[in-house]
Amino acid sequence: MSGDTLSDLLRAVRLRSAVFFFVEGTDPWVAETPCAADIVSAILPGADHMMEFHGVARGSCYATPEGGPAIRLEEGDVVILPQGDAHVMSSQPGLRAQNPDREIFFAPRPPQMPHALNLREPGATTAHLDGGGCESATLVCGFLGFDARPFNPLLASLPRVIHMPGMADGWMGTLLRSAVDESARKRPGGEAVLERMSEMMFVDVLRRYLDMLPEESTGWLSGMRDASIGRALAVLHERPAEEWTIEKLAEEIALSRSTLHERFVHFIGTSPMQYLARWRMQLAARSLTETDAKVMQVAMDVGYESEAAFARAFKREVGTSPAAWRRERRAVAAAK
């Protein structure tokens, strides 16, 4: 593994994306997206958790998470719903679709993404347009999925909404321009390019969000930023199979055992050894899902000398045996 803890985590939880559509609308327009858990099986089969992002390629609009305030978005802004909340995108705050149709998310996909939707076409999407306005907006909308089980510490450290203004000159700007272009030209490989770009956009947003966090904030991202706890996380991620003890880890990062424990719990919410145990299970789950390695080999790769001890630990953390986990995940993959 590399010394880049965030990249290690995103690989382990299998970050992937789908640029689903870009939208053009003339006011007054409104589009509703249900809770991600209700549509993840259609958009990103096999993902435990899904979040949606919207980037404003042209014009302005409002994003309103369920139960939350409306957020004004300007050209070049991006909004991400990390917890998968239902939300409304609209030309003005307070608008709601009269008859939102969730089946649009389960309808057969066009041969090539992104799919362009014109909000003036009745029944084109969950959108509803009363018509007649002169202000228009163009949005690029996509989805990001990853594993929530057995262990994804990033999820708990993210808010309900991340609004990142002024990203037109970065990855988001490139993604916005490319999505509009790919929708019109349908070039070979365009969908794959946009998927990778949206993943890079997400990482860029995370880094900017991390830079904006107050010094007193806690959580996995804040812990990664802290010099001592960031080093502890990096060491555990780099060498997860090593026979770590709290004493050995404290010596590695030049802290006392009590200080390490206290600071780690403060930021991460669990002890270093508990974190390591759960991180090992996430690595093992990924290996069981993506490779044909024998269970004993997986056990050894994450620091267990006994297959039985590993199986007990895995079942305790995940709720099922390693073999059952592998069967379940492969059945989901086969059903895509």
Image (cartoon, helix red, strand yellow):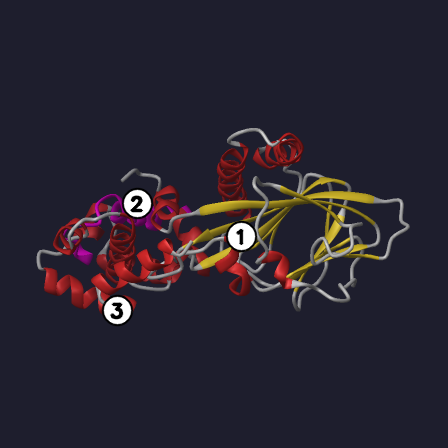
Mark 2 and mark 1 residues within 8 Å of each other at the beta carbon: no
Q: Secondary structure at mark 1?
A: loop
- The first of marks 2 and 3 along the sequence is 2
- The first of marks 2 and 1 along the sequence is 1
Mark 3 and mark 1 residues within 8 Å of each other at the beta carbon: no
Give residue 152's quadrant in the image: bottom left
The magenta stretch spans which residues?
225-247
Q: Which mark is residue 2?
A: none
Along the viewing direction, whichever of 294 and 71 lies nearer the viewer = 294
Residue position marked by numbered label 3 in the rendering: 320
Name the residue at 70% across, 63% down.
Answer: 69
Q: Secondary structure at mark 2?
A: helix
The amino acid at mark 1 is Pro
Name the residue at 12% across, 64% down.
Answer: 309
Position of residue 287 measured from the top left corner of the image (x, y, whole percent): 25, 50
Give left or right: position of 63 versus 188: right
238 drawn magenta: yes
Q: Residues within 10 Å of mark 1 (few under 14, many from 20)?
A: few
Q: CA distance from mark 2 to mark 3?
A: 29 Å
Residue position marked by numbered label 1 in the rendering: 214
